[in-house]
C-alpha cells in the first residue's frame, strides 16, 4: 500500500515505525495472548507501558522530579477549563496572551471560572500574524499564572523564545509543537498538550505540572478535575485511554531511538527552512503572511492569488498524494502541517509541486 504525504493539522501523521510496531503487537502483546487494547489498566502488562511512556517524556524533555507527568482525557479544550479550575483561586486573576483562536477559547473558559484578563494580543482585524515581544506584555505581578499558546495552528505563528513572567507561573498550551525541540521545562508551571498533532493519536492529553502547584490547587472542584487526584494515582484514577497511551509510548520510543530531541529539532528546522525558502523564492505567487521571526516550524500557512486557485491547488495536490493542505475553515488559504512525523521527503515533494503549480 502506498502511503500518502500527510499534512493534516490533527489528528496528524505518526511515525511509520510506531505504527508498524503496533501492527506487529496488535493481536498478541508480548506473548500475553491478547491485545494491549484488551488488557486491564490495573494489570502488569499495561502498567509497564504506562510507566515507560512517563519515563520517556521525562527523559526526552529533561523533566525533573519537581513535576508530575500526567496522562488525562478531554483534550486541550478541557484543559482550557481545568487549568483555571485548579490554579485560579477566588480573589486572584490570571493573565492570558492572545495569539490565535485557541488562546481566545482558553481565555473564554477561564472567564467562566474566575477573573482573567488580556495581558497582550497581536490580533489585527481578527488575524494574527505574529507573537508579541516581551515589551508588549502587560503582566500583573500578582497574577495566579500567565497563559500562552506556544504554537498557533490556525495562523501559523510560534513563540521562538518564551516570555519571562518573573515569579508568576507560566502555563502553556503546547498541543501542536510539544517535543519538536528540547526546552527548559523549569521555566513553566504547567504544560499541557493534546497528543494528536505531534506525539500520538487523539484521546490522550499530556500534562506536565509543578508539584507545588498541584499541592496548592483548589479542592472545591469535582475530584475528577483535580490534578492532585490524577497525580496521586499515577494517572490511573479511572480507566485511561490505554491504546492511545500505548501508541504514544511507541512514538516516544521512536523519537528516543532517532537521537532524541536534538536530532528531532534539526530535522524539523530543515523541513521548515525548505518550505519557507520556497515560499520566499516564489513570493510573487505565494504569500506567506506571518512575520519571519514568528514563523511556525509546525504549521506553514500561505495564500495564492485567488481563492479559486487555492481550491485547485489543494485538489490537484490531493490527486498527487498530498493530503490535508486546506487551511482552517476560519482562515482559508493553504496550510501544510509539518509535524515531527512528516518526512523531509514529503516536504520536498510539496515544494516541487508548488514550483510546478506556480508556472500555471
Image (cartoon, helix red, strand yellow):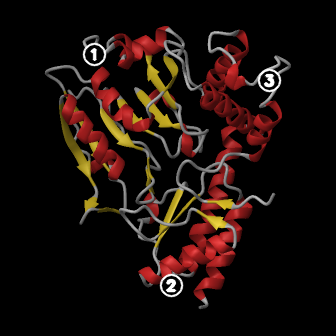
x and y percentages locating residue 149 in the rendered image: 39, 44
Q: Residue 42 or 256: which is nearer the viewer?
A: 42
Outermost residue, right side: 31
Left or right position of 216 against 20 = left
Q: Earlier in the sequence, mark 1 or mark 2?
A: 1
Q: Say which quadrant the N terminus sits in.
A: bottom right
x and y percentages locating residue 154 in the rendered image: 41, 57
- In front: label 3 or label 1: 3
Q: Which residue is mark 1?
A: 221
x and y percentages locating residue 206 in the rendered image: 51, 30
Q: Earlier in the sequence, mark 3 or mark 1?
A: 3
Q: Residues within 10 Å of mark 2 (few under 14, many from 20)?
A: some
Outermost residue, bottom side: 360
Q: Could you tell me if the residues under marks 2 and 3 are in contact, i.e. CB atoms within 8 Å? A: no
Q: Could you tell me if the residues under marks 1 and 2 are in contact, i.e. CB atoms within 8 Å? A: no
Left or right position of 334 against 322 = left
Q: Earlier in the sequence, mark 2 or mark 3?
A: 3
Q: Residue 183 or 107: which is nearer the viewer?
A: 107
Q: Which residue is mark 3?
A: 29
Residue at left 28%, top 49%?
135
Q: Which residue is mark 2?
A: 285
Does 92 appear above or below 314? above
Q: Could you tell me if the residues under marks 3 and 1 are in contact, i.e. CB atoms within 8 Å? A: no
Tell me which corner region of the image, top left, top right, bottom left or bottom right, holds residue 113: top left
Does 234 appear above or below 312? above
| Distance between the alpha carbons at the discs numbered 2 and 3 | 51 Å
Secondary structure beneath label 3: loop
Amino acid at each position: 500500500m502506498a502511503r500518502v504525504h500527510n499534512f493534516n493539522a490533527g489528528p496528524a501523521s505518526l511515525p511509520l515505525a510506531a505504527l508498524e510496531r503496533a501492527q506487529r503487537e496488535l493481536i498478541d502483546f508480548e506473548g500475553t495472548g491478547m491485545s494491549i487494547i484488551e488488557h486491564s489498566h490495573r494489570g502488569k502488562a499495561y502498567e509497564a507501558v504506562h510507566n515507560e511512556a512517563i519515563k520517556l517524556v521525562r527523559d526526552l524533555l529533561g523533566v525533573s522530579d519537581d513535576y508530575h507527568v500526567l496522562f488525562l482525557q478531554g483534550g486541550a479544550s478541557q484543559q482550557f477549563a481545568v487549568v483555571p479550575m485548579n490554579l485560579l483561586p477566588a480573589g486572584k486573576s490570571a493573565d492570558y496572551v492572545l495569539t490565535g483562536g485557541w488562546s481566545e477559547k482558553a481565555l473564554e473558559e477561564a472567564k467562566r471560572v474566575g477573573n482573567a484578563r488580556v495581558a497582550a494580543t497581536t490580533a489585527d482585524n481578527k488575524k494574527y500574524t505574529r507573537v508579541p515581544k516581551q515589551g508588549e506584555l502587560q503582566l500583573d505581578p500578582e497574577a495566579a499564572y500567565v497563559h500562552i499558546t506556544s504554537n498557533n495552528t490556525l495562523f501559523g505563528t510560534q513563540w521562538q523564545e518564551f516570555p519571562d513572567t518573573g515569579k508568576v507561573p507560566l502555563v502553556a498550551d503546547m498541543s501542536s509543537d510539544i517535543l519538536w525541540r528540547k526546552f527548559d521545562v523549569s521555566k513553566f508551571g504547567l504544560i499541557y498538550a493534546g497528543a494528536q498533532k505531534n506525539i500520538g493519536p487523539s484521546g490522550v492529553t499530556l500534562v506536565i505540572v509543578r508539584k507545588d502547584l498541584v499541592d496548592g490547587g483548589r479542592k472545591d472542584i469535582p475530584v475528577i478535575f483535580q490534578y492532585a487526584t490524577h497525580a496521586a494515582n499515577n494517572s490511573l484514577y479511572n480507566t485511561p485511554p490505554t491504546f492511545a497511551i500505548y501508541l504514544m509510548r511507541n512514538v516516544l520510543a521512536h523519537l528516543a531511538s532517532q537521537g532524541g530531541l536534538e536530532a528531532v529539532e534539526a530535522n524539523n528546522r530543515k523541513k521548515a527552512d525548505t518550505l519557507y525558502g520556497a515560499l520566499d523564492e516564489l513570493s510573487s505567487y505565494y504569500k506567506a503572511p506571518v512575520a519571519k521571526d514568528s514563523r511556525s516550524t509546525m504549521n506553514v500557512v500561505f495564500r495564492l492569488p485567488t481563492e479559486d486557485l487555492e481550491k485547485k491547488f489543494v485538489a490537484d495536490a490531493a490527486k498527487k498524494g498530498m493530503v490535508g493542505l486546506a487551511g482552517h475553515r476560519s482562515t482559508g488559504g493553504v496550510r501544510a502541517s509539518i509535524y515531527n512525523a512528516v518526512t523531509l521527503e514529503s516536504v520536498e515533494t510539496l515544494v516541487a509541486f508548488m514550483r510546478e503549480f506556480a508556472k500555471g
